[in-house]
Image: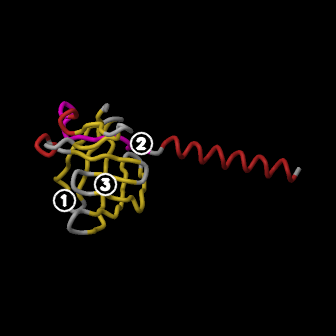
Amino acid sequence: MGRLFKFAMAAVTLAGLTLFEAYAVDLSGAWATNADQCGQVFVRKGPAKQIGFTALSEQHGGGFIVEADRLRGKFANCKIKSRKDDGQTVNIIAGCATDIMLSNVQFSLKVLEPDKISRMFPGMQEMEISYYRCPI
């Protein structure tokens, strides 16, 4: 009976972890401030067809790329240090590097739709920027 109980507990724990992962917000991909401008912001390049930024991406609103444990902007690369999903809001703390400095940055993203998020800025309730996932 003890082995059956341990097996049942392991199965319940595993099912719980799978359920938790299923509800985690998927942010992977390329995100632009204007869905109609995706082709002017992002490009696939190299033999691996990696997503990158066009030369004039900032003139079309810009955006960022989310990959596993990284956030990439045109001028900064960030490693995600922590992430907390809180319902429809994802709070991220990332260590970012630019050509001139290193810093920790906090990102608060609110999921509005599966392919639309809004970046909120702590301490500035009125300021939000919407981003759209690009089908690139």
User: Farthest right residue?
Assistant: 1
- Label drawn at residue 4: none
Instruction: Determine if the magenta segment contains residue 50.
Output: no
- Residue 119 drawn at (x, y percent): 25, 50
Give the image's coloring scheme: secondary structure
- Residue 123 drawn at (x, y percent): 21, 63
User: Mark 3 or mark 1: which comes first in sequence?
Assistant: 3
Q: Which residues are magenta?
A: 25-37
Check if mark 2's residue and mark 3's residue have beta carbons within 8 Å. Answer: no
Q: Nearer the viewer, mark 2 or mark 3?
A: 2
User: Mark 1 or mark 2: which comes first in sequence?
Assistant: 2
Residue 10 versus residue 113 in the image, above or below: below
Q: What SS does tag 1 mark?
A: strand
Instruction: Determine if the magenta segment contains residue 29.
Output: yes
User: Farthest front residue?
Assistant: 47
Of the pair 52 and 111, the residue shown nearer to us? 52
User: Mark 2 or mark 3: which comes first in sequence?
Assistant: 2
Residue at x 42% of width, y 56% of height? 84
Q: CA distance from mark 2 to mark 3?
A: 14 Å
Q: Which residue is mark 1?
A: 124
Residue at x 66% of width, y 47% of height? 14
> On the picture, is 86 further left or further right than 136?
right
- Residue 96 drawn at (x, y percent): 30, 62
Of the pair 81 and 19, the residue shown nearer to us? 81
Callout 3, which amino acid? Answer: Ser
- Label drawn at residue 26: 2
